[in-house]
Image (cartoon, rainbow, N blue to C red):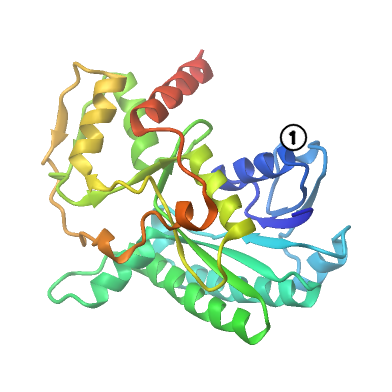
Amino acid sequence: MKNVIVTGASGFIGSNLVRNLVSRNINVCAIDFQFSEELQHMKNVQCILCKDKTMNDIKMQLESTYFDCFFHLAWGGTSGPNRANYELQLNNVKMTCDYIMMASELGCKRFIYASSINEMETYEYLQSDGIRPSGGYIYGTGKMAAHLMGETVAYMNKVEFIPVIITNIYGVGEKSARLVNSTIRKLLKNEYCSFTEGKQMYDFIYITDAINSVIEVADKGKPFNRYYIGSGYPKPLRDFLTELRDVVNPNAKLGIGDIPFNGIDISYDQFKLKKVYEDTGYENKIPFAEGIRLTVEYINSEEE
């Protein structure tokens, strides 16, 4: 790869992806609503602000006329109340299809779609009875719709569509209130943390392994095949929480079982957990405990 496009380039995943691509001497066109000083001044990166701009406006600003791959990470409303905002989530679906059409018009033959494990949870919910849907299922439905519609639009326009099903990414640089990041920060402050019984199956992957996996899939993955981006070793959430606690604050008491669990426990048997390794040769480098240690060091240095 020599020239690529990355949407959602300022997010936790997107910014790490851009840095990794640049380190490989790949030119990046970054598209987002805002950019850090670092990205704006990074060598071999063109930043395009997309707010209030049409797809044609964005296309007209592209400095390059040829792209090898299109990484689509942009998605509004990934957390908080906006996960239940159906207008926003439907707009995300349309945006995905519009970017696929842009890729086709640019002659970019490969499109990486960043999906989420929430898509699979939503699919399994649809097969269940007697469960009350939470607002998060609107987000999951959007991801599922963008996946299938996008894949169809791509196929019809001769674009190689590759969905990456991303599980729970954590690591250095994260600012969100997601589970690992928020729990580490609370435990470092000796705050009490409440959880469900944690019997549901979970998986986590450190940020550098996730980014390397996605890039290897973009380079060597098979079109119209989905790739699971995770450690490949799912286990009950309570086991991960205990391991996290033992690294961060061994004397802390975890409130496992404080919160009732009303969701869906997805089956990881539906995934080819080692498909990234089988098709690309890339193997994860950072085990969970080591990733937690690195993240703790980052948070401590940040607060100092």
**Residue at 39% across / 26% down in the picture?**
290
In x, y percent, where is residue 5?
72, 58
**The disc labelled 1 sits on which kind of residue?**
Glu
> Left or right of 226: which side holds 112?
right
**Residue at 33% across / 20% down in the picture?**
188
Residue pointed to by mark 1 = 37
In x, y percent, where is residue 268?
27, 59
Quadrant position of residue 155: bottom right
For this orientation, the residue located farthest to the bottom is 156
In x, y percent, where is residue 98?
66, 75
**On-image quarter of the N terminus:** bottom right
Pick whichever, 79 or 27, lies toward us.
27
> Left or right of 120: which side holds 145?
right
Residue 112's place in the image compared with 98, above or below, is above
Q: Tell me if residue 135 can be seen.
A: no
In x, y percent, where is residue 114?
52, 60
Residue 36's place in the image compared with 106, above or below, is above
**Residue at 55% across / 67% down in the picture?**
222
Pick whichever, 31 or 168, lies toward us.
168
Q: Tell me if residue 6 can be seen.
A: yes
Check disc 1 and report its element: helix, strand or loop.
helix
Residue 287's place in the image compared with 132, above or below, is above
> Left or right of 178: which side holds 202?
left
**Residue at 21% across / 27% down in the picture?**
192
Q: Residues within 10 Å of mark 1 (few under 14, many from 20)?
A: few
